Image (spheres, rainbow, N blue to C red):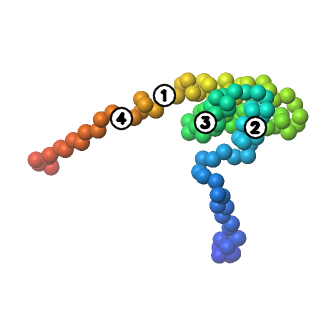
Amino acid sequence: MKNQLESKVIQYFGQEETGSLIGQENTILRLLYENGYEQAEIDLVRDVFKTRNIFYKREIDKLKRTIMRQKNKGDMYQDDLRDLVKVAKEIDKNTPDEEALTPKKVESVLFYVNKNE
């Protein structure tokens, strides 16, 4: 029985890179472009989609679902797009620069122990 179940398992290996945008994210970026947002704002939203911060990720995913639901129903979604750009700017402002995280100098230290008791 176990062998039968294991043989029916199909793994999906896509050609996309790990962390590449999914369909909804591409659609939202297209909507931003069609609604006249600047390229810098679109790039900012693209970067925010790849964030690893779980608190920001949860908020971004909620906005993505809301925008796609409203778009599919034919409702107005521009306010949520504006909120998404606003959240992306806030995340970018609160994220430290990568230069601050890059070490300037690395030193190795060696400790000797005389008696290990």
4 or 1: tag closer to the N-terminus: 1
Which residue is labeled 3 in the image? Answer: 47
Real-space CA distance between mark 4 and mark 3, rounded to the nearest whole angstrom: 23 Å
Task: Specify the label residue 30 is tagged with.
Answer: 2
Vertical comparison of 67 with 117: above or below: above
Amino acid type at image mark 2: Arg
Rendered residue at 75%/37% (across/down): 30
Mark 2, residues whose alpha carbon is within 10 Å: few (<14), some, or many (≥20)? few
Real-space CA distance between mark 2 and mark 1, rounded to the nearest whole angstrom: 28 Å
Mark 4, residues whose alpha carbon is within 10 Å: few (<14), some, or many (≥20)? few
Tell whether 51 sits left or right of 117.
Answer: right
Residue 107 visible in this rendered orientation of the protein: yes
4 or 3: tag closer to the N-terminus: 3
Q: Position of residue 4 (x, y in %)?
A: 69, 75
Vertical comparison of 116 with 58: above or below: below
Real-space CA distance between mark 4 and mark 2, rounded to the nearest whole angstrom: 38 Å
Mark toward the viewer: 2 or 1: 2
Vertical comparison of 57 with 16: above or below: above
Q: Which of 26 and 67 is in front in this view?
A: 26
Q: Position of residue 44 (x, y in %)?
A: 62, 31
